Amino acid sequence: MKNVTLKDVAKAAGVSYATVSRALSGSPQIGRETRERIVKLCDEMGYTTNYVARSMVKKKTDLIGLVVPSIDNSFDAELAYYAEMSARAHGYNIMLCNSGPDLQQEKTVVKLLLGRQVDGILIVPQGPQTYENIRAYADQVPIVFLSENLRDQPQSYVATDNSHGTYIGTRYLYELGHRDILYFGRRQSTTHQLRAEGYIRACRELGLEQRFFNSDFSSSSIANGYQLARELFEREMDYTAIFASTDSNALGIMKAADERGIDIPGQLSLIGFDNIQMTSLPRIELTTIEQPKRDMAVQAVDMLRDKIENGRQGYIHQILLPSLVKRSTCRALD
């Protein structure tokens, strides 16, 4: 098999190699009709740009690596979508890698991206260990962390004020009359520690007993939430509301509650966190805390481009405010 080259296109078009090159680069020296004819011919012949050769000339690949724990996770998938749209609008392509739950795999994909000579890397980290895990590679290429709050680490990141999110959600349940609110989720990552802290702060201010049902899972998913909720519902239900640390957990709770004949919100109010797309579907209509996913992704890409294109040194910690999305899974108590 033979790759189609610019010389092949030039020969078929009856023009010079330079004319084809200028036409594809958008040079004003080439007329509109000639450019359209050459572009059409490239499509018909199956010509593709040799980005490896181009990067050697430009000393730049126009590639951004994006590392997420799992593209199967709805939140990660939405972040990846917005990041790619933003990067593409500025002439960059995304190379997407799943790091999985394994820190060694996370390091492996970072090394892979460095080997591919990406111009920069966006990382949705697995947890607080990620920074130390890839520290040896952090100075080799511009890096911006996305979604996870690294607290005081000297690295740029864009995250949501997770503590404020659970704080306003807990106060909302209190305003609806709930005094027995169970917090359902994991606390392994900094993000989830901050979410638990917001719940604790609200409980202290409102004089509520803190109730926790903690997950041992290293990641949140509908399946994990469902499995844990089945265990939870085997016990006495001495609470009127559940604050799930993620929407995925909340959806698992809804499934388990439906199997047990527990009416939401009639018998149990439920609130999630993230506002992933499926939470707004009919018959779900989950009340949740919205993470501004599009803004997070766009700002992270802009921050990374600034490092790549302007050689910006130092680091920025950007924290965005979440908001409460009121739907159908919470009710006011009589």
Image (cartoon, grey):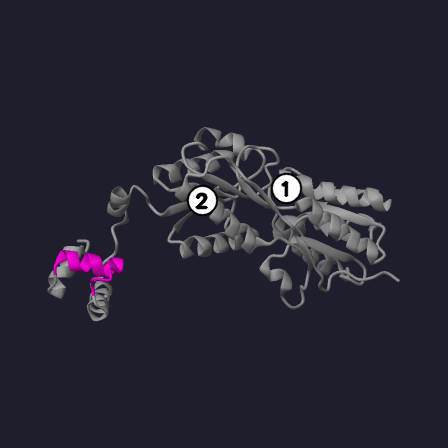
Q: Give the residue pinned by disc 2.
A: 306
Main secondary structure along the magenta-highlighted residues: helix
**Residue, x 59% and y 37% (percent of image)?**
150
Q: What number of labels is visible?
A: 2
Asked if one can make out residue 40 in the rendered structure from this viewpoint, the answer is yes
User: Where's residue 132, x and y in %?
Assistant: 53, 30
As drawn, is 145 to the left or to the right of 180? left
What's under tag 2, amino acid-wise? Asp
Q: Residues within 10 Å of mark 1 (few under 14, many from 20)?
A: many
Q: Is residue 321 above or below residue 119?
A: below
Label 1's element? helix
Q: Is residue 323 above or below residue 67?
A: below
User: Where's residue 212, x and y in %?
Assistant: 76, 42
Asked if one can make out residue 66 in the rendered structure from this viewpoint, the answer is no
Of the numbered discs 2 and 1, the one sitting upstream in the chain is: 1
Q: Which mark is residue 265?
A: none
Which residue of the protein is positioned furthest toward the bottom in this rendering? 33
Label 2's element? helix
Q: Give the residue pinned by disc 1.
A: 191
Q: Is residue 24 magenta?
A: yes
What's under tag 1, amino acid-wise? Thr
Which residue of the protein is positioned furthest toward the right in this rendering? 334
Q: Which residues are magenta?
A: 16-30
**Residue, x 35% and y 47% (percent of image)?**
62
Q: Is residue 300 magenta?
A: no
**Residue, x 80% and y 47% (percent of image)?**
235
